[in-house]
Amino acid sequence: MNRLVHGDAFAGTPVKSLADIEKVQPPGAFTRTIEALFVGWRRHFGWIQVLMFVVFLVVIGLPLLMPDPPAESGILTNPTLFLRYMLWGIWFPLVFLSVIVLGRLWCGTLCPMGAASELANKYGLQRAIPGWIKWEGTPALSFIIMTLYGQTLGVRDHPEAAAGLFGGTMLLAIAIGGLYGRNKRVWCRHLCPIGRVLGLYSRLGAVQFAPKVLLGGGDAYTERGACPTMIDLPRKRESRHCIECFRCVNPKAAGSMRLELRRPGVEVEEIRDHRANKAEAWFLFLDTGVALGGFLWLVLPQYQQMRQGLGVWAIQNHIDWITRVGPSWLMSVHPARAETFLWLDFLMIVGFMLGTMAVLTVVLACLTAVGAMIARKLGADGGFGQVFTELGYQYAPVALMSLIIGLGAELLNPLRDTAIGIEGVHVIRGGLFLIGVVWSIWLGDRILKRQGIDLSKRWLPLLPGIAGSLFVGFGWWPAIFGL
Ligand code: SF4
Ligand code: SF4
């Protein structure tokens, strides 16, 4: 682990002398071997990304050319269902699960979208990056809008919707790359909805790239260096923006970056030293809430009752447009598959998801605020905002596990038809969730320790955090154990 002896990340101390520089211990032989392997393969990453682009076209495009699967078909007998399973059952949960071990390796080596955006940038206009793109809230807004849009389009059930959403996002990534930045991945740093979530959870990951000689001053944003995601390399201390492209690694150079392996979660345990960020903590609450809403409206009978109630009220009050069919670019209109959304459905889905997001955010924020107030009373080091932000990160594991269990539920579905059965699937999901809760509690304890609270007192400010983790679990209960 890197330790900076001078200059706190919050203070942003500039480098003044050699006293601000720390030389850190080199990693072991195993890490160096992996590093050498990837550095050797670095020049082939482009071809891997081209191959992934072809896979992307097949998974997104082929189902458009095939007839709808017959009712009795399964993933092993129907190519459309197989490709759908590849997308939602394999890619989606495994990319998120992989960050715990591999960090954002997906982004740097495999993702065709980021690579296409960067290629477009190479030959594009290379204009200055506008302020609205650099705004801290842009990636979170991007995630929320994409999640809402995916749900109203029915992206999981309709190949046209998946092609429209993923194809449209790809075009947008290429357009942004073609317009802004100079040899950079502006899309990946600021706008990609998946990248932002992967970035947050990569802080839990076992991989990081660290400077061999770490300068003081904390993380900074720079468009000058070699890093495609604008990381000021000699001051890099946080993992979230690193896409693991290996471009900054030169095993022979004394002053470059290098691969380091670490205990999963350690960056969050010591989040004070890794640029705890209040926007990121808030968006952890918001993202978890909107994803939960996107799952719950599909399964809760109360959602249908509310929909019915709003529909009846609208008809009684002569608000006729609400019962009309909406445009197919905005919502699911597939009469042949017996699914046609009205404006009523659109309003209900968006309203329900935003409402769930608001409730979860308020609950987690209140509990975190209570935890921060107690912690400060017990002598936590730092102002309320800082202590609150740091404690917000304790929910990262439980939120990640919930996301995987809830939105990546298809991953385990094939196991239902094996000896493991439905009960076994529930046990696996419950086990994953339990790991998330226990890990969150552990992180809460470590964060409080770093804030200077004695072991004997830590249980008290930890209680609101435990309640918050259990609340997240309560929300995802139907995904874990069924209704
Ligand atoms: S940030 Fe998004 S577009 Fe960029 S490499 Fe990662 S997943 Fe792909
Ligand atoms: S820090 Fe290095 S490995 Fe990470 S994105 Fe920047 S250049 Fe790539």
Image (cartoon, grey):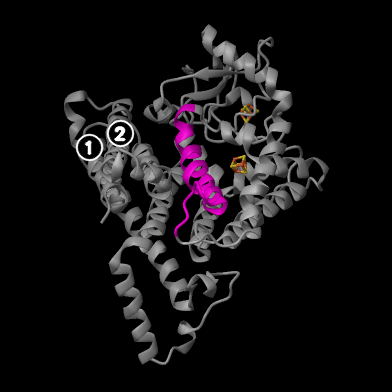
Q: Disc 1 marks which amino acid?
A: Pro
Cα gap from disc 1 to disc 2, whole angstroms: 21 Å
Q: Nearer the viewer, residue 412 or 418?
A: 418
Q: Nearer the viewer, residue 387 or 322?
A: 322
Disc 1: which residue: 461
Instruction: Tell me whether circle 1 and circle 2 mark residues in contact (CB < 8 Å).
Output: no
Is residue 461 left or right of 23 when viewed as pictured? left
- Location of residue 15 (image quadrant): top right
Q: Disc 2 marks which amino acid?
A: Ile
Q: Over which residues does the magenta segment extend?
A: 72-101
Is residue 464 left or right of 11 when viewed as pictured? left
- Which secondary structure lies at badge 2? helix
Quadrant where the C terminus is found in the figure: bottom left
Where is 351 relative to 167, above or below? below
- Which secondary structure lies at badge 1? helix
Q: Main secondary structure of the magenta part?
A: helix
Answer yes or no: disc 2 within 8 Å of ligand 1: no
Is residue 218 left or right of 446 when viewed as pictured? right
Is residue 25 in sight in this rendering? no
Disc 2: which residue: 435
Q: Which mark is residue 314?
A: none
Membership of 227 in magenta stretch? no
Q: Residue at x 80, y 40 (%)?
A: 122
Is residue 450 left or right of 105 when viewed as pictured? left
Q: Position of residue 185 (x, y in %)?
A: 68, 40
Q: Residue at x 39, y 89 (%)?
A: 315
Mark 1 or 2, nearer chain start? 2
What is the total number of numbered labels drawn onto the structure image? 2
Membership of 78 in magenta stretch? yes
Q: Position of residue 366 (x, y in %)?
A: 28, 51
